[in-house]
Image (tube, rainbow, N blue to C red):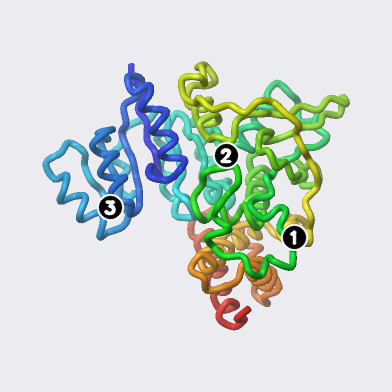
Amino acid sequence: MKKKIAILGSTGSIGTTSLNIIKKKNNLFDVQLLSANKNYKSICDQIIKFKPKYFVVTNNFIFLKIKKKFKNKKTKILNSYDNLSLLKKIDITITSIPGIAGLKPTISLVKKSKKILLANKESVICGWQIINNLAKKYKTKIVPIDSEHFSIMKLLENHNKNEIEKIYITASGGPFLNLPKNKFKNIKPKDAIKHPKWSMGKKISVDSSTLMNKILELIEALKIFPFELKKYQIIIHPQSLVHAIIRFKSGITKFLYHEPDMTVPISNAIFDSKFDINNFIEKKNKIKNLEFFEPDERKFPALKLIPKLNNYISTPIIINAANEILVDHFLKKKIRFTSILKHLFSLLKDKNYKKYAIYNPTKLGNIYLIDQWSRLTILKIINKNKY
């Protein structure tokens, strides 16, 4: 019997990679739901190729165009995730909607899916308590598919929590690893989105260049694998071939190595590791010298956020929301690259910061309240400080 599959964010890099995997084994899958925002051409192509039962298009203008174009097709075009009640039980859901916009639909699909493949950082950072509680209630298996968290999960298999001494999250260092610090103020968006190893969206590419992606991944790891903060460390690994390292108290250190291609963790998660990767990727790096070294805090001031992660329960939600706004403003050339972290640290000194940071994120209403305060406050900081 074919497995019923849903992909939230099907036109992004994770979504398209997932569909490429499914396309090569299309006799095994029945695509029930795809969703996207406004990539008209990709949406049309996916409806024609994969014939999903439902397609959610959140941009209203694009929704109307798509609905008109496919009015006589079997695919039902929706413009809201509120209609997900129409869906019956799903075998596998892949969630990759960027930003906090992915939280509510992820929560909805946890209730309907046997297995959730999580690639939406913000859902974990902001709503892990809700997602995890629902997963337990509905017996839904959660599999993180960011390469770092998938690697940590695999390395922890068959090991007791008490065996772990240190967990290293690797970072490529992004496009500016070897750029002198005095040139950072002249960095342009077109340079920041050129990741040396990975093919990613603009927002996450900028996060990689500031190392904010590793701060967000550290927050994710703390939620999914709740070890003490001091057990985690971020380490630079320019080759992007080792995605996590775990040092055990026994003196043994293990690491997980795979190509810098999201096909590897996604396909392993879909097939439960029972498949041949040669059916999906051709290019493979030869094992060669691997470098690891500590990141330079002067170049990557985001590292100074790490001690603050344990300050208050909702500090991660505030950091995540503000960073989304700051990266968007940088991409629109409204602020400098160096202003991203400067403004973020200013936010954490705001007189109302603690008031919102102590809110308990056990309800969606609280999460959105904290998120909204952070976004509005960072906009005020941006408008006040033109540097």
Which is more toward the observer, 18 or 162?
18
Looking at the image, which residue sits at the far left?
72
**Amino acid marked by disc 3:** Asn
Mark 2 vs mark 1: give the one in front: 1
Label 1: state its secondary structure.
Answer: loop
For mark 2, what is the residue? 146
Which is more toward the observer, 22 or 90?
22
Instruction: Give the mark nearest the N terminus, 2 or 1.
Output: 2
Look at 66% across and 38% down and name the residue there: 240
Q: How far apart in space, not on screen, are marks 2 and 3 (Cα)?
A: 27 Å
Residue 136 visible, this angle:
no
For mark 1, what is the residue? 299
Residue neighbourhood size for the residue with mark 2, other residues' Cα within 10 Å, grouped as few (<14), some (14–19), many (≥20): many
Look at 49% across and 55% down and name the residue there: 100
Whether 315 is drawn above or below 258: the answer is below
**Amino acid marked by disc 1:** Lys
The quarter of the rendered structure image containing the C terminus is bottom right
